[in-house]
Amino acid sequence: MNHFELRDGVLYAEDVPLPYIAAEVGTPVYVYSRATLVRHARVFREALSGLNKPHIAFAVKSNPNLAVLKVLQKEGFGADVVSGGELVRALAADMAPQDIVFSGVGKTRAELVQGLEADIGQFNLESEEEGHELSAIAAAQGKVARCALRVNPDVDARTHEKISTGKAENKFGVPMSRAGEIYAALAALPGLDMRGIAVHIGSQLSSLEPLETAFEKVGALIAELRSAGLKVTHADLGGGLGVPYKADEVMPTPADYGAMVARVTKHWDVALSFEPGRVIAGNAGVLLTRVIRVKRSSNASPFVVVDAAMNDLARPAMYGAWHDIDAVVPNGARHIAHVVGPICETGDTFAMNREMDALQAGDLAVFRTAGAYGATMASSYNSRGFVPEVLVDGDRFAVVADRLPAADIMAAERVPDWL
Ligand code: LLP
């Protein structure tokens, strides 16, 4: 459910017609709906209502825009961050330090220090080596870092291979077979408060089964650790819930997920936390674009060349991902077309032989479900500027990230005087 709907033949974001935003801000532009973000946040929280005070940390990587983080902060969400930059953003959005969890396989020394200085809620350690480094830093500063150990349950999440994180060959977490030994070793170090286990097996999961298998392994590990006399008070179950990218796609609902979690974790006796990203932000955003021209091709389908490109929305080029593409003012006609951006490589293709609303030069269109892993993955490839972002709230909207023109990006470059 989202708030991008046709009204009298025009696509609106809440109560704002998208052509109005295109006229005011230009295209391409990401448009987010506050009401949709709030709704998703509440549905997710409600789905977990059977659990005892779950902690929800929004995966900042999915949409790090400050205004988006602020909307979620007001909904009581904390943050799952994976870099010093994301930590700064979470704090800037007034997320309480104790509600911030720091994940990531390659936290640098500077980032560990930054997390300690901010006194964040939890570090999710991805290796024994990282635990030793954090222990040394914390002990030297007379601090104690609250930590969970991320385990790799060797479960196939059955999603795209580039966003699977829980198979033995993936770089994430420590192997289950060594988790007990590593946890015990880290628990004995100064400066660390080892308090739990973290797991995250991948993103855009279309089935709950792999999650359930992974959580069962975590439950068994918790029991094993406790029987060895170790303290376990927390478990972080990560994110990963998939969203429908096609109108007719069926995904497990947050309620199904919550019921499964409640069943599997019933006897764990720990404080649970979650790191949802896509399920909160995905359908809360669209990428609004304008057709530059329609070019005949050597087969029956024309190339619809739009002003958004793979630098603005990388998912189709990176993962072959599908985004529904709809006209903003559909006239009822349909056609079969290729939809491409202006960038000089064939990977800059959003759709091939897609049956879709007919589009002509000058028409506006949207890529749906672009609120997660959209603007955050943008680049300036082909010296295109950074795409702006807009947040709609009822009948008002605000530009929440300026368009960054190519000239401003170039302004950060220097030609040395010896050239
Ligand atoms: N927690 C951790 C440790 C993660 O690595 C991720 C996502 C999440 C939580 C949030 O997962 P979500 O609930 O959003 O599925 N760029 C890719 C997705 C990469 C996901 C990376 N990790 C895409 O566009 O599909």
Image (cartoon, grey):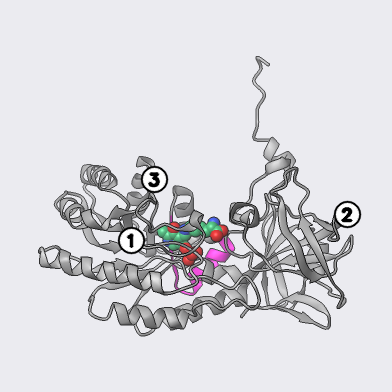
Q: Which circle marks residue 295 in the picture? A: 2
298 lies left or right of 383: right
Q: Position of residue 90 (x, y in %)?
A: 47, 59
Q: Is residue 76 magenta?
A: yes
Label 3, secondary structure: give it. Answer: loop
First of labels 3, 2 by sequence position = 3
Q: Residues within 10 Å of mark 3 (few under 14, many from 20)?
A: some
Q: Quadrant of residue 327?
A: bottom right
Residue type for callout 3: Gly
Residues drawn in magenta: 63-81
* Residue 293 to residue 325: above or below: above
Choose mark 3 or mark 2, whichever is in front: 2
How far is disc 3 from disc 1 in space, using C-alphas?
Answer: 19 Å
| Residue that appears at 86% across and 54% down | 297
* Residue 301 to residue 345: above or below: below
Q: In the depicted view, which residue is nearer to us: 343 or 391?
A: 343
Residue type for callout 1: Gly
Q: In the depicted view, which residue is nearer to us: 326 or 394?
A: 326
First of labels 1, 2 by sequence position = 1
Q: Which circle marks residue 106 in the picture? A: 3
Q: Are the two marked residues, 3 and 1, in contact with CB atoms closer than 8 angstroms?
A: no
Label 2, secondary structure: give it. Answer: strand
| Residue that appears at 56% across and 68% down | 281
Choose mark 1 or mark 2, whichever is in front: 2
Tell me the quadrant of the picture where the C terminus can be found.
top right
| Residue that appears at 38% across and 42% down | 108
